[in-house]
Amino acid sequence: MLLFAFLPAWKALFSHPRLIQAIVLINACVVGLLASALINPVITSSIKSIGDIIAIIIGYILIKKYNCPVWLLAIFLIVYTFVINL
């Protein structure tokens, strides 16, 4: 109910162009911070060879171009992991 009470004031705040620019800037900063948090610990520790990069690219193509189900992609990547580690 509090949200509905604040809604007219929220709409009035968003009519100011400088406030809209500030919110867009804050959103861009948050996206950059989240991207750096993803790159540093996750990507640097999980990609170890060119085969890993190729598997990622193939997975991306399967999802975007061929609309492959996510569960099938997960099985593909699990099988890839077991084959690579033999």
Image (cartoon, rainbow, N blue to C red):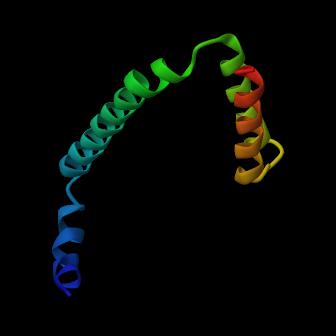
User: Horizontal placement of 45 versus 8: left or right?
Assistant: right
Q: Name the image quarter holding the C terminus.
A: top right
How far across and down, in percent of the image, does residue 73 sit?
74, 44
User: Horizontal placement of 63 versus 30: left or right?
Assistant: right
Instruction: Using the image as rendered, state which of residue 64 and residue 5 is in the foreground.
Output: 64
Q: Residue at x 20, y 56 (%)?
A: 16
Instruction: Using the image as rendered, state which of residue 27 and residue 35 is in the foreground.
Output: 35
How far across and down, in percent of the image, does residue 25 sit?
26, 38
Q: Relative to 16, is 12 above or below?
A: below
Tell me the quarter of the picture where residue 76 sits.
top right
Q: Relative to 60, is 50 above or below?
A: above
Spot the residue most to the front: 86
Q: Name the image quarter holding the N terminus.
A: bottom left
How far across and down, in percent of the image, does residue 30 sit?
29, 39
Q: Residue at x 24, y 70 (%)?
A: 11
Spot the residue most to the right: 66
Tell me the quarter of the picture where residue 37 sits.
top left
